[in-house]
Image: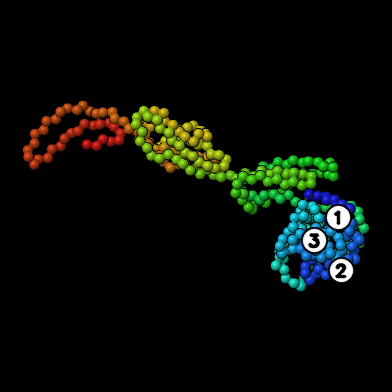
Amino acid sequence: MVEHIVMPQRKRIAIIAHDNKKAELISCLQQHREVLSQHDLFGTGTTGTLVEEALNLLVTKFRSGPLGGDQQIGAKIASQELDIIFFLIDPLDSHPHYADVQALLRLAEAWNVVCGITTTCIDFILTSPKMHESCTRSVYLAPVLPRIEANKRKPLVHIVKQRVPVVNQNSKLTLPQISQTRPILSSIECTYISYAYQIAMHCEQLQAPIILRESSDGEVPLGSRKVFTCNAIGYPPPTYMWLREWQNLTSNFSSFSYFEITSAKKQDQGSYRCLAKNDVGIVASKTTHVTIWYFDGFTSNQRDQFVSISESDAVVLQLPTISSSPEPTV
């Protein structure tokens, strides 16, 4: 995608030079003072001060390079507030902020800014007829799209095309293929805005269900109420199915994360579990054992027993059969 940036007739020029190059830069600029007086000047650290004193022209000054001046210039480039850069680098000396220098030059190249890195280049630029007229530079921009993990999910892409006067009516936008190398850790909305188009990309993280809370074993009196719960997280949100002894209690998966026994019966006793499912996977909760308390009394007729035994003899007593849960103790 191409963005066209208009450079006005009064251009904005940034001036930078390393210590061993300052004198050479000042000597070069003094030859073009009349041209420079027709433009807005910016400078870093002592370079800006020296240019201001030598040319008797107003210079907007930033911090010195090692203290962030190069980064300030880079920010001006990215915000389209600079048109030309004069940067004399000392190739025979080391610099502690060399990474900042490289970053600044990279931004200048990315935004197609006019650069003069030698006094010869500066002479050619300042003597060019384009210094006295408005002109346009083209910036080739590629949408910065999020990279998603392979075979994980498909992004939903919504493209909104807005026409502006400089764009031809037949202009088209081609969305590049998405690189699938880096996972997205959460739901992300990515928006890329250019000169003519706005692209909004919505990417969703998919996650298999994970059960966070489930019911524990319990004992319920006959006729009482019992509620089982199973809370799970995941994306898309999971649905639930309840089982007793691996037999379905609900016909289909639903959004209900609980199952209720309104009035406990004997046949409700057993092992319960929950299945949580979404588009990514399915998981089962641990087994919850439920005991139903009841007492039906004696299941056989009880009659008095009269037993005669001799001293030191053993005797076996026939106790009545009792239907209850839990089992009675004697």
Residue at disc 2, secondary structure: helix
Q: Are marks 1 and 3 in contact (CB under 8 Å)?
A: no
For the residue carrying disc 2, how many other residues have a C-alpha within 10 Å: few (<14), some (14-19), or many (20+)? few
Contact flag, marks 1 and 2 (Cβ < 8 Å): no
Residue nearest the observer in this picture, 146 or 106 = 106
Give the residue at x 86% y 55%.
11
The CA distance from mark 1 to mark 3 is 14 Å
| Residue matched to label 2 | 27
Amino acid marked by disc 2? Ser
Seen in the picture, residue 50 relative to 141 is either above or below; the reply is below
Which residue shows up at 77% across the image and 44% down it?
197
Disc on res. 11:
1
Q: Decide: is 87 above or below 160.
A: below
Q: Is residue 283 left or right of residue 53?
A: left
* Foreground pick, 176 / 28: 28
Where is residue 173? Give x, y as percent. 77, 45
| Tag 1 secondary structure | loop
Q: Which mark is residue 43?
A: 3
Above or below for 305 versus 96 = above
Name the residue at 34% across, 31% down: 221
Q: Give coordinates of residue 160: x percent, y percent.
A: 74, 40
Disc 2 versus disc 3: distance between alpha carbons? Answer: 16 Å
Q: CA distance from mark 1 to mark 2?
A: 21 Å
Tell me if I can see residue 26 in this picture.
Answer: yes
Mark 1, residues whose alpha carbon is within 10 Å: few (<14), some, or many (≥20)?
A: many
